[in-house]
Image: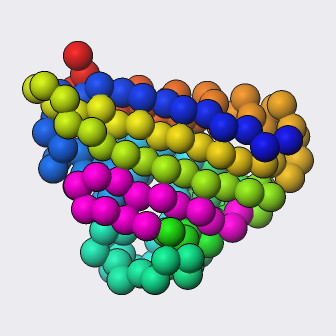
Amino acid sequence: MRTTLTFESILTSDPETVWAWITSLDGISKEMSPILRMSAPKGVRDIASTAFKPGVPLFRSWICLGGILPIDFSDLTLLSITPGVGFVEQSRMGSMRFWRHERTICPVESGCRLTDTLTFEPRLGGPLAVAFVRKFFAHRHKMLRKHLGAF
């Protein structure tokens, strides 16, 4: 059962600030906290400055429940990255038959619109897995609005 979900936030921060946030491991961690945390190799601070080839995994990230208990992995793979505009991630994950995350920034008056479009197919759990992803990304956008301001 392949599902597509879209989440959108209008933020008061400028696009450059939002870009730095969404590509930094610190920003990603703050968005996911306290529910999940993604690991990264030592020295990796952001995905924007990590050399990549489209479709080739950057690294394996362990996804930890509560920041402690490993419950999944992602072979983090970018298909494209456009500085200041967005990226397309399509990663192999233990919990998903298919995972694609498109994240885009669009300038608006006095800030920007951040849109996440997720297309995924859980290996197990069907509707329960879809509900978790929906709640988790709603939480991420709540944290984005908290840290980056919202209209």
The answer to which of 3 and 147 lies nearer the viewer is: 3
All told, the count of numbered labels is 0
Q: Residue at x 61, y 28 (%)?
A: 135
What scheme was used to colour the molecule?
A: rainbow
Q: Quadrant of the C terminus?
A: top left
Q: Main secondary structure of the magenta part?
A: strand
Q: Against 80, is 105 above or below? A: above
Q: Residue 23: percent from the left, percent from the top?
A: 33, 58
Q: Is residue 26 magenta?
A: no
Q: Which residues are magenta?
A: 80-93
- Which residue is rendered at x = 54% and y = 71% of the image? 77
- Residue 147 seen in the figure: no
Q: Locate residue 41: give its quadrant.
A: bottom left
Residue at the image position 35 percent from the left and 54 percent from the top:
86
x, y percent for residue 7: 49, 30
Q: Is residue 138 above or below residue 51?
A: above
Q: Is residue 108 left or right of residue 51?
A: left
In depth, the one of 1 and 139 nearer the eye is 1
- Residue 143 is situated, as x and y percent measured from the top left of the image, at 38, 32
Quarter of the view holding residue 137: top right
Write the residue at 36% across / 27% down.
Answer: 9
In this image, 122 relative to 146: left or right? right
Q: Does the magenta portion include 85?
A: yes
In the rendered view, would you say 92 is above or below 56?
above
